Image: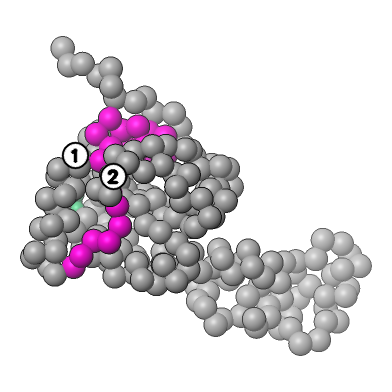
Amino acid sequence: MSDNTNIAAPVGLPKLGAPAPQFEAITTHGTLRLEDYSGSWLILFSHPADFTPVCTTEFIGFAKIYPELKKLNCELLGLSIDSVYAHIAWVRNIEEKLNVKIPFPVIADLDRKVANLYGMVSMAESKTETSRCVFVIDDKQNIRAMIYYPLTTGRNMDEILRLITALQTSDAKGVATPANWKPGDMVIIPPPLTIEAAEERVKTKGIEITDWYLSKKSL
Ligand code: BEZ
């Protein structure tokens, strides 16, 4: 009989807006804790397995957007249910074969402690691998966005950059962002909450008003 005593049990999914579950983990950059990232934004992402093709393209993608993320005060932290030795061998292989240095740490989550805290293993998809999850954690360590992709489909790095930029824009300016928004586009002014405010809104100059509940402005 196998001994599963060191395998952490699933504890459910994190919640948007809630504090991100705290952890301490072994990574390719030494032992790290979530609290080490307090004060900066963090993309905590999982991949199914080292030395697999889609994951390799994603690692290259994450490495390429890393300088842009740094400008947004955002760090990257990868994770899979692989050993630190496998991670080291894989990132060295990516550098050797594809000439891309992986600048961010990768958690070796062999006991699934972090994967289970964040609901990264979808048993119906794979019992042994983490799905392609992305958790955007803000500088106050709250979960701000979650993306789950299946094993077969590599993630879109432009969308991840767009998402961080949109969240930070909303925080800084008190606005929302419309579908397909990108930096430089108009933003949505939160809709009025009273009849009086709605009447004021439709009379406001200098903004684009479709109706009282849908108005936009340039930043
Ligand atoms: C991949 O990264 O190519 C991959 C990993 C796990 C399952 C399927 C594809």
Query: In whole angstroms, how far apart are the C-alphas of marks 1 and 2?
Result: 13 Å
User: In the rendered view of the protein, which quadrant contains the C terminus?
Assistant: bottom right
Q: Is residue 97 left or right of residue 204?
A: left
The residue at the far right in this view is 196
For the N terminus, give its image quadrant: top left
**Residue 217 in picture, x, y percent from top left:** 68, 80
Classify 62 as above or below 183.
Answer: above
Question: Mark 1 — residue?
Answer: 83
Give SS at disc 1.
Answer: loop
Magenta residues, dominant SS class: loop
* Residue type at the position of mark 1: Ser
Label drawn at residue 64: none
The part of the image, by quadrant, that contains residue 172 is: bottom right
- Front of the two marks 1 and 2: 2
Q: Which residue is mark 2?
A: 30
The residue lying toward the viewer, choosing from 219 and 205, is 219
The answer to the question of whether label 1 and label 2 lie on touching residues, with beta carbons closer than 8 A, is: no
Residue ID at (51%, 50%): 38
Tell me if residue 112 is in the magenta stretch. yes
User: Taking 196 as reference, is 115 left or right?
Assistant: left
Q: Is residue 34 visible?
A: yes
The amino acid type, in three-letter code, at marker 2 is: Gly
Sequence-earlier tag: 1 or 2: 2
In magenta stretch: residue 106: yes
Disc 2 residue crowd, few under 14, some 14–19, many 20+, Cα 10 Å: few
Q: Position of residue 64 (x, y in %)?
A: 29, 70
Residue placed at 83% from the left, 82% from the top? Answer: 204
Residue 30 at x, y = what percent? 28, 44
Farthest-out residue, top: 1
Residue 19 versus residue 7 in the image, above or below:
below
Give the extent of the magenta segment. 100-122
